[in-house]
Image: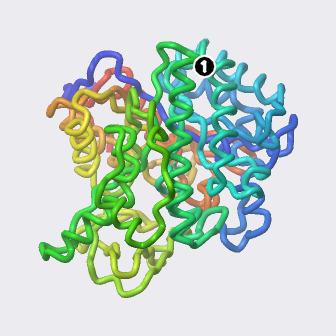
Amino acid sequence: MGRMTRRFPEGFVWGSATAALQIEGAAHEDGRGDSIWDVFCREHPERIFEGATPEVACDHYHRYLEDVELMRRFGHNGYRLSLSWPRLFPNGDAAANPKGFDFYDRLFDALAAAGVAPNVTLYHWDLPQALGARGGWEDPDTVERFADYAEACFRRFGDRVSLWATLNEPSWSTLHGYLTGIHPPGRTEPRAAVLASWHLLKAHARAARIGHEVVPGSRIGIALNLSPIHPATDSDADRKAATIADGILNRWFLEPVLLGRLPEDTVALYESCGILPSMGASDLEGGLVDFLGVNYYFPNHASADAGETAFALNNSGRKEDASAFALAGLFRFVRNPKGRYTDWAWEIDPAGLEQLIVRVHGLRPGLPVYVTENGIGLQDRVVDGEVQDDARILFVREHLEAVGRALDQGANVRGYYMWALVDNFSWVNGFKKRYGFFHVDHATQARTPKKSASWFRDVALANGLTDNRAT
Ligand code: BG6
């Protein structure tokens, strides 16, 4: 086994993560309605790598028992998943779909039997199309519909789920849905982005209040995509650009859920642009989280040299395809000349995870933190029945070491969910970008454990890292 180099706290959760739309498939089965993503993929195949769709995804709806068995065999004691809102409420209104609820009953029972504790996200981007058509997250009524949906889930599943996240990555979904237009609904309007993000923050607070009422003792959090934002140089202008970007991308979401308030500088910025939504004094009430879910992939480097607004996402995995994120007059993200990058141009920087967790600990000392997503997209292949994904083992090891350093500084990290359980529908990247512990052949749906799955099983069972590097 090797000598233990890092022991994790007792009860640490070892698992992986998925989202309903990315794995379930069965898009038209048992009464499920369309989500905005189903429709976007059908209507805009040119925006998705190779025109992929989530219709079948990993067929998890039919293969969930096999998938739960994989978790059990490979030492997972936790699993982060999301519920499909359009499977439970196909039209986004009050009419529930009993077969949808039955599916999650079966799934939660299987997880319990396997000794795997669920960490459940209510909203991972699959808004019912019926609500999307009425204005989506720009429409205040969507907040009401979300509150009803959340209440139904708390009531039905609250006896088997004790960890809930209201939303997955409201920053990423509003920015790409309403500002860059790369995700549905494909809007490119700063006012719409700020309004949608505000409604998401309200929806989070509403759901958290309801959950605490309906299931006393439940622990309710949120999963935020956080990214340390470094100034590209030491200049004052770049430092200012980094602070602005940090306000828009991180603090606008982080401060309400950790501190119950919005960041003043970002409020002032939106006000000066005339895009600050009208806000009620009690809108954020009840939204303080019991735990924070940190989704971390890469850091950013901000330059003040931002003449034009520009957005591009490398969704091909070809190294030469550039990414861009610039807001004219505010900031532009630039490549780190010293950085290590994935094929999809995401920088690999484990220290960023340590910095983020320590930052959260500084804002809310001792708050339980779960790493709710962290992983690397690779072009994994099965060769002679095996997948040698040493790059993933290295990535996860380095990030777990970073978690260890955050623990040394007093942070209360309770678990780590690798993204992802299985190779899945990677949004605009289609199926080429593979993240799983388990390789999925999308023609046959065969699952093949990768080398990383066995490595992670040993880490989970030892509850720590050893000097047996396996790579
Ligand atoms: C997060 C999402 O943004 O990153 C996941 O919560 C997603 O759903 C993951 O799959 C990786 O991103 P991508 O675009 O490479 O699939």
Q: Is residue 330 above or below residue 98?
A: below
Q: Is residue 52 above or below residue 419?
A: below
Spot occupied by residue 412 in the image (x, y as percentages of width and height): 26, 27
At 49% from the left and 41% from the top, the residue drawn is 283
At 87% from the left and 37% from the top, the residue drawn is 31
- Label count reads 1
Pick whichever, 275 or 181, lies toward us: 275
Q: Is residue 146 above or below residue 96?
A: below
Quadrant of the drawing holding the C terminus: top left
**Label 1's element?**
helix
At 30% from the left and 64% from the top, the residue drawn is 340
Report the side of 383 relative to 351 (left or right).
right
Residue that mark 1 sits on: 111
Category of crowding for the residue at label 1, using alpha-carbon neighbours closer than 10 angstroms: few (below 14), some (14–19), many (at least 20): many
Quadrant of the drawing holding the N terminus: top left
Write down the quadrant of residue 60 in the picture. top right
Report the side of 19 relative to 268 (left or right).
right
Spot occupied by residue 149 in the image (x, y as percentages of width and height): 69, 33
Q: In this view, does 324 lie above or below 270?
A: below
Q: Can residue 404 be seen at all in this image of the molecule?
A: yes
Write down the quadrant of residue 112 in the picture. top right
Spot occupied by residue 386 in the image (x, y as percentages of width and height): 53, 44
Report the side of 34 relative to 258 (left or right).
right
